[in-house]
Image (tube, helix red, strand yellow):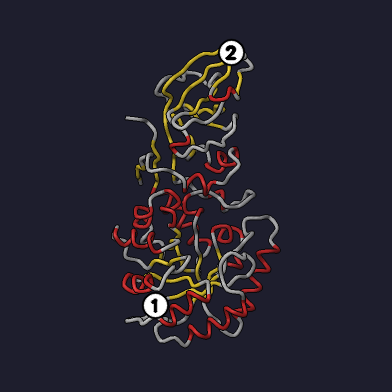
Amino acid sequence: MRPTNATVSLSALRANALLARRLAANSKMAAVVKANAYGHGAARCARALSDVADIFAVACIDEALELREAGVTEPVLLLEGHFSPQELALSEAHDFWLMLHSEQQIQQLLNFRAQQTLTVWLKVDTGMHRLGLAPAAANAAYQQLGHCKHVNQPIVIATHFASADHRNTEPTARQITQLSAFNAGKQAPVSLSNSAAILAHTAAHGDWVRPGIMLYGSSPLEYSHPYANELRAVMSFRSAVIAIRDIAKGESVGYGASWRADRPSRIATIAAGYGDGYPRAAVSGTPVLVNGRTAPLCGRVSMDMITVDVSDCPDVRIGSPVELWGNHLPVSTVAEHAGTIAYELLTRMPGRVPLQYEY
């Protein structure tokens, strides 16, 4: 059996969720399990968090239906709302909560002939300029929804931060101020905080927090932070050495001969490549752990294999264990060497790599 796999620690997942709980002790939690729980398996992760999270959040109704089919019974928030009037009936039937972000969605909901009330959140654009209504339009929508007999009250007012992960706190402060001004006189429950704000912006915790990437053990912050340092890696992406060869100084390794040995070198081939979710953009020098020691990637990433220079790693043999990212090598470190972010590497894990779960 090919040695490549990813192990998901459900105890680490729960520890990260409990950290979010501790930091935002007065807030309810919408645990974000969209994109298959960032590549970790949405159903298994949701079940593991059923006694920690108040609700779960996904991008769309297809992801929500998968949770229901897997036996998850908690309310599920659709972060992009409904895409058609037909989805309103499904949301009513399955207790899906709707994040309304456009006038079209709001009119469809107002015109919907509901058999029971629906729970809605109203998204206000305070500076992200991606989804959400501008404050003036959002105020009119809030009034309309407030008078709609098939909408549960109170309505949660939500926004999304554009720069909560940055050292410069001014943009986030402006967004907090703008949402507070919008809510003045309404006193509606609010939801502002993503993972970055949960960790670094206590003033933004509000009534509902929406932890995402932090649940899976990766910090969204662009700088070191004591709370972020408490996060535990949830996924360990592992493989093994399947070949070893000694090459002379000046010999090349891999496609395009992009890497050449500057000394006599020992090269280990590992059974993982971009077909397994390892980033093709990772450059030579990207760290890989072989037998617990750091070895640099050398040459281009292939579909099924990578090669690393283990000249300075004693006792490497065929079958030696390899950590591509996990407990001892943060996924964010690999992402940085590939010119991307941890979110992308985690969510792009393919079905080819078996997920194994442990507590």
Dot label at residue 264: 2
Classify 251 as above or below 218: above
Residue beneath the point at 37% across and 60% down: 62
Q: Position of residue 188 (x, y in %)?
A: 53, 80
Could you tell me which residue is drawn at 46 percent across and 29 percent down? 305
Q: Amino acid at mark 1?
A: Leu
- Report the amino acid beneath label 2: Pro
Which residue, given by chain and number where applicable, does mark 1 sit on? 118
Q: Position of residue 37 (x, y in %)?
A: 42, 53
Q: Please indicate whether residue 261 sits to the left or right of residue 78 in the image.
A: right
Determine the secondary structure under disc 2.
loop
Q: Quadrant of residue 299?
A: top right
Q: Is 255 on the left or on the right of 66, as rendered?
A: right
Give the camera-side residue of 62 and 11.
Answer: 62
Cα–Cα gap, marks 2 and 1: 68 Å
Residue 147 image point, x, y percent: 47, 88
Element class at badge 1: loop
Give the residue at x 29% y 57%: 70
